[in-house]
Amino acid sequence: MSTNTQQPSLSNQEFDVLVVGAGFGGVYQLHHLRQAGFSVKVFEAGGNLGGTWYWNRYPGARVDSDFSIYQFSMEELWKDWNWSERFPGQKELVEYFDYVDKKLDLRRDITFDTRVTAAHFDTTANRWVVSTQNGITVRPRFLILCTGFASKPLYPDYKGLDTFKGIIHHTYGWPQEGVEWAGKRVGVIGTGASGVQVIQECGPDVAHLTVFQRTPNLALPMVQHKVSEKTQTKMKEEMYPYLFRRREQTFAGFHFDTINTGIFDVSPEERYLKLDELWTTGGFNYWLGAHTGIFTDQRTNDEVYTFWQKRVKARINDPEMQRKLAPIVAPHPFGTKRPCLEQQYYEVYNQPNVTLVDINENPIAEITPKGVKTRDGVEHELDILVLATGFDAVTGSIAQIDIRGTDGVLIGEKWGKGLSTYLGLTSANFPNMFFLYGPHGPTAFCNGPTCVEVQGDWIIDCIKDMRDKHFTRIDPTKVAEDGWVKYVNDIFSAGLWNKAKSWYTGANVPGKVIESLNFTGGVPLYLRACREAAEKGYEGFVFS
Ligand code: N01
């Protein structure tokens, strides 16, 4: 059902800004640009607001950031809103978006069920010509892509995938009406954040669960709990403004930061107790709040992994399961592939109705009408198959659109040879186009709302500055872009990132160039670069 309100036809309209996507990023842009007096429209492929929280409605989906920091920082939004849990679930996040929609009167400028398929730059008018799947064409001055880093799902290329006779779904785009799995035989391929959440949710309900794991997730205890209104009232009175300002000062845009002392600069006792404290605090503290050397120094990383391995192993009964889920030798440096937060995930593997197939040892040979056949000849019969196989992340969301700049080259073609952006916000030959929470931004290493707000503010200020100076076109220069690409790659190569095959580097997508898709230097360094460019009159850009 479409949730579009009655709107006059948009076709052929000219306006200031078209925002693509109505998740955190798109909502922030719409509200603030409208407030600044621009005419703004949003096209959203889904039937409602929420972005990732609209699409990822698989059972068990919930956020991995603390509620306090995983919301908009505007007081008008947080002052009357209360969360129920430390890490809110998908349904509550959708309710939050409904609340934000009503508070800010967003819907009148959003067209739902409208997927942008093409955007071509008209060099004569200095406007984008944007077309949608449902036949709308508009001509905005600026194009702002708030398409998220995970909106192009990745399907495995297994022989026979389309022959499976049971129910099959990717975690992204789970059916609105849900899937009844109680008493059924369920298979899950993939143990990333989505897979872990599905597995721990369905494990206790299903007749049999078969998990097909390629790489163990180095998952961390969530330490979930309810949060009272009273606690939040107190936080609002005192803490929130500090908390939101603090986000800009920490590596990953959270309220906590990495520890500055080296892990070996303290006694073994202090080190152990610190790791234990981070562990029991829960959330990403054990990862993004750990010692700074974790991403650059293998010895530091090994120490953190060993502690993790012992803690996790102790929760698993069967030695074979222990070996597969918490191996003595780390599958990759800890944290160089995204750990996720778990609730009783490891205990699921102590249940008698759960089989874990390590597909490195025993690969999937094919998908059959009845289930999944592995190389050892066993056919794992299933009623439901869940593809938790992830995304063509970071660049895929943008590159899947037919976006052509001044030279007619597709953005996907340009980036297919190696990612190139300036400031993780723009790309040369694509004038008047911005993106956020995407390529070369702090994206994968940043709390989502922090990322969209700090990058979003930069974009809004830039467009306002252009209006003040009567410019109609902004072009990032090739020289500036080359400099940014080198800067991003230099920081990246000082780290351990390349030792993991993950979506952080594109290594999860067959044929994709393996490189840094994100800015790995942390939020403060990132912001310094963006703000310095702006202070120097938007250095690296040409205006006309
Ligand atoms: O995707 P992933 P995701 N055959 O790419 C496996 C965010 N998120 O949807 O590791 C078999 O992480 C793959 O194996 P391997 C979060 O940022 C957040 O889980 O490549 N297996 C891996 O195990 C997250 O990082 C939340 O060896 C195949 C899995 O599938 C990001 O989204 C919740 C395969 C994919 O894991 C993506 O997470 C969910 C194949 N052909 C997502 N191809 C929260 O905040 C892939 N795999 C809670």
Image: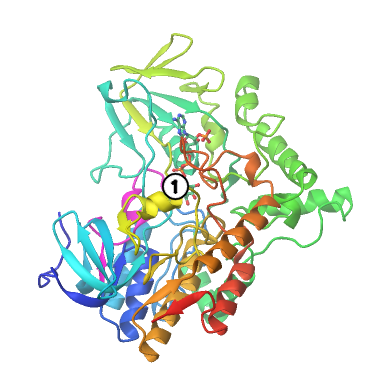
Q: Is residue 97 left or right of residue 359?
A: left
What residue is drawn where x is 54% and y is 74%? 244
- Mark 1 lies on a secondary structure that is helix
Question: Is the residue 317 above or below the residue 88 in the image?
Answer: above
- The extreme bottom residue here reads 468
Q: Is 3 situated left or right of 214 in this image?
A: left
Q: Let me know if residue 74 appears in the view.
A: no
Q: In which quadrant of the rendered view does residue 248 lie?
A: bottom right
Tell me if I can see residue 160 in this picture.
yes
Whether the magenta-drawn stretch holds residue 57 is answered as yes
Q: Position of residue 498 (x, y in %)?
A: 63, 43
| Residue at 48% across, 57% down | 439
The magenta segment is 41-61
Residue that lies at the very extreme toward the top in this rendered image: 377
Please identify the quarter of the rendering in which residue 315 is found: top right
Overall secondary structure of the magenta section: loop
Q: Nearer the viewer, residue 440 or 322?
A: 440
Viewer-nearest residue: 468 or 19: 468
As rendered, which of 488 and 369 lies closer to the eye? 488
Residue to which mark 1 is pinned = 416
How many callouts does the rendering have?
Answer: 1
Seen at 30% across and 81% down, the residue is: 34
Where is residue 167 shown, x and y percent of the image?
27, 29
From the viewer's perspective, is 521 left or right of 466? right
- The location of residue 466, given as percent across then percent down, is 40, 84
Instruction: Measuring from the top left, give residue 29's x and y in whole percent.
Output: 36, 73
Residue displayed at 39% across by 31% down: 156
**Quarter of the figure with the N terminus:** bottom left
Along the line of sight, the residue nearer the viewer: 185 or 212: 212
